[in-house]
Image (cartoon, rainbow, N blue to C red):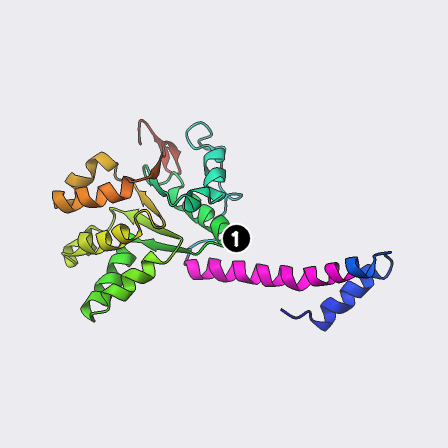
Amino acid sequence: MKMTEEQLDQFLKQTSQTSLSPTELLSKFLEGPAGTSQESAIQSRIQRAGFPTEATLESYDWTRNPKSIRKETFLELASAQFIQRKENVAFVGASGLGKTHLIQAVGRKCCALGYRVRYETSASLIETLNKARAIKALTPKVKKYCSYDLLVIDEFGFEKLERKEVPEALSLLYKVIDGRNRRSSTAIITNVNLKDWTDYLGDPPMTMALLDRVIDQTNIIAFSGKTVRGPIEGQT
C-alpha cells in the first residue's frame, strides 16, 4: 500500500529531528505502509468472518464467573495453537453465560493472526447448504466451508424448526463436519449437553456419527455459573 502525501509529510516531520542512518530511515519509512496493509488485511478477514457483533476478549465481563470461566482458557484459544494442531472446540452450557461473545472474541484474535475464520449459526448453515443442494451445488458449497481454518457453528441444537423443514439437516451438517475432521478446526457452541444429543436431535445413528466427529480431538469447555438472567446451579 502506498503512503499518502499526508502520511509522508507526517513521517518527514517526525524524522527530521532524528539522527537515523539512511538504512534506519528507509526501514522506518517502510514500516508505515506495511503496517497499514497488515491492518487492512486483518479487518478484511474479520469482515469476511461474518461475526454478528463487535465482541472482544477485552469487553467480556470476567468478574461475573471468575472461577468457572477463566480468562486464561480463552487467551490460550486466542493464540490459535489449537488451529495449528487442527483441534476442535466445543463450548457447552446454558444461555446467557457468554459463549457466543467469547467464541467471536477468540475468532477475531485468530483473524488477526492470519487465519481464515467463518461464523455461522447451525440454522444459517443448514439453510445455505439446503439451498445449494436444491440447485445441485452442494459439493462446492461444502468444499467452501471446509476451506476455512476455523468454522464456528453457533446455536447448535437451536434449529428445531429448520430440522423440521429440512429433513436432511443432520446429514448436511455431517458433510461439513466430517469434511473438516482432522483437516481444520471447528467450534461448536451449544446449550445441549453432549450426552443428551441423541435424545434431543433424534436419528441416533446419524447423531452418533456427528457426535464422534464433533468430539474428536476436541477441547470441551463447560460453562457454568451466573448468567445474565441469574445463577445456574450445576449447569454444564
- Say whether residue 101 is visible: no
Q: Is 77 included in the stretch rendered in magenta?
A: no
- Placement of 212 over or under 232, stated as above or below: below
**Which secondary structure class fits the magenta region best?**
helix
* Residue placed most toward the observer, 234 or 76: 76
In the rendering, at what x and y percent does residue 216 appear?
A: 29, 40
Q: Which residue is mark 1?
A: 112
In the rendering, at what x and y percent does residue 86 appear?
A: 38, 45
Say which quarter of the image contains residue 215. Answer: top left
202 left or right of 68 in image: left
SS state under label 1: helix
- Placement of 147 over or under 200, stated as above or below: below
- Say whether residue 186 is visible: yes
The amino acid on which the numbered mark 1 sits, given as a three-letter code, is Ala
The quadrant of the image that shows the C terminus is top left
In the rendering, at what x and y percent does residue 197 appear?
A: 20, 40
In the rendering, at what x and y percent does residue 203 appear?
A: 12, 46
Residue in the picture at 31% in, 53% down? 121
Q: Which residues are magenta?
A: 25-50
Say which quarter of the image contains residue 24. Answer: bottom right
